[in-house]
Amino acid sequence: MAKISAQFSALTKALNAFVKENFSEDYSVRMGADFYVDLDSDVIYYSVITPEKDEKSFCENFIKRFPVCADISPLMLSFMHEVGHLEEEWQMIDDTAERELCTECEEYYDLFNERIATDFAGEWLTAHHDFAKETDKKFITIYEKILDKILD
C-alpha cells in the first residue's frame, strides 16, 4: 500500500490544498483503504478503490437528493461527504447502535450523521457548482495520470 500511496502523493497534495483553502487549515488528507474521517485528528481519508456496488448506491442516493451534482465524480462526492462530517461534527450524535442494525445501504444513508454530512456536501457543491466541477476535473486529471503511470 505504501508504494501505491506514494504514487498518489500529487492527488493527496491537491486534496489537501483544496480543504485548507476552502474549509480549515486544521484538516488534512491521507490516502486510505476507504473513504472515512478521523474526527479526533481532523483527517479525511480517501480511497481510489471502492466496491462498485457501494459507489453506485452512494452516488445514486446523493444525486437523488442533489440532482445538480450528477456531473460531479464519485471521488468528489465521497470526499465532500467526508468534509461534511468534519464541518457538521458539532451536531453529530452517537448513532453506534443504529449503525450496527443497518442491513441496507438506504438505511445507512438515512442515519442522522450520514444525512447531515451529505446535506453539507450537496449544499456546498450546489452553491459552488462551477468551481466544484472545475476542481473535480483537476482531481480526475491527476488521478488518470497516476493510473497511466501505474498501468504502464
Image (cartoon, rainbow, N blue to C red):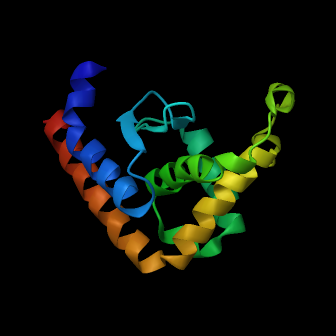
On the picture, is 67 further left or further right than 12? right
- Inspect this view and state whether residue 122 appears: yes
Asked where in the image residue 5 lies, by quadrant, the reply is: top left
Q: Is residue 4 above or below residue 67?
A: above
Q: Is residue 109 visible?
A: no
Percent across and percent down for residue 132 are: 42, 70
Residue located at (45% from left, 27% from top): 33
Quick one: 90 or 75, which is closer to the camera? 90
- The C terminus - image quarter: top left
**Residue drawn at (77%, 40%) of the image:** 108
Measured as percent of width and height from the top left, residue 130 is found at 42, 79
| For residue 44, above or below residue 117 | above
Give the side of residue 134 with respect to residue 61, left or right: left
Give me the residue at 52% from left, 56% from top.
77
**Can you say whether 147 is above or below 96 in the image?**
below
Q: Is residue 53 above or below residue 134?
A: above
